[in-house]
Amino acid sequence: MADTEYDKEHAHPGVGQYVEIGVILAVMTLLEVILFESFDRGLLKSVGIPALIILTILKFMLVVLWFMHLRFDHKLFRRVFFVGVGLAFLVFGIVAVNFYVGPRIGF
């Protein structure tokens, strides 16, 4: 019986790469704190909030892909996970639009 792609052992990163990802996450967290503190110093929320959301999504993806080993699992698991995340964002977006626009467009 032949081994499938799923049965083959994947090379996981070493300690060095985990430390590297940890440092990247720490720097991204520092950027988030600096952005948040900049709101009091005149940073526009229309600039700062999208930047915070983007940083949060990038940090989430790094944690999921490396520390939860989703990057090394079968492609089907990755796809199912990210389809679920996409649906969650869609629902969140609909609810956010409903709160922002209100009953004017009939949600």
Image: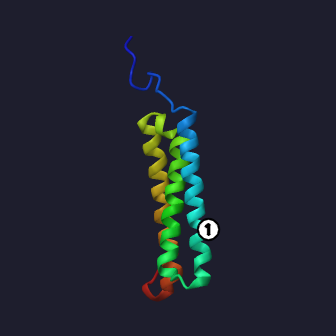
> Residue 18 location, x and y as percent?
56, 40
| Label 1 secondary element | helix
Question: Can the viewer see residue 68?
Answer: no
Q: Is residue 57 left or right of residue 1?
A: right
68 or 55, nearer to the observer: 55
Mark 1 closeness class: few <14, some 14–19, many ≥20 residues within 10 Å: few
> Residue 36 location, x and y as percent?
60, 73
Q: Residue at x 51, y 30 (%)?
A: 12
According to the picture, the residue beneath numbered tag 1 turns out to be 33
* Residue 39 to residue 70: above or below: below
> Residue 37 location, x and y as percent?
62, 75
Say what amino acid the circle numbered 1 marks.
Val
* Residue 51 to residue 5: above or below: below
Q: Work out which residue is located at the far bottom of the displayed protein and give it.
A: 104
Q: Residue at x 54, y 44 (%)?
A: 20
Q: Quadrant of the N terminus?
A: top left
85 or 28, nearer to the observer: 28
Name the image colouring.
Answer: rainbow
> Residue 72 location, x and y as percent?
47, 34
Q: Residue at x 58, y 42 (%)?
A: 19
Q: Residue at x 49, y 56 (%)?
A: 58
* Residue 90 to residue 49: above or below: above
Q: Work out which residue is located at the far top of the displayed protein and give it.
A: 1
Question: Can the viewer see residue 95?
Answer: yes
Q: How many marks?
A: 1
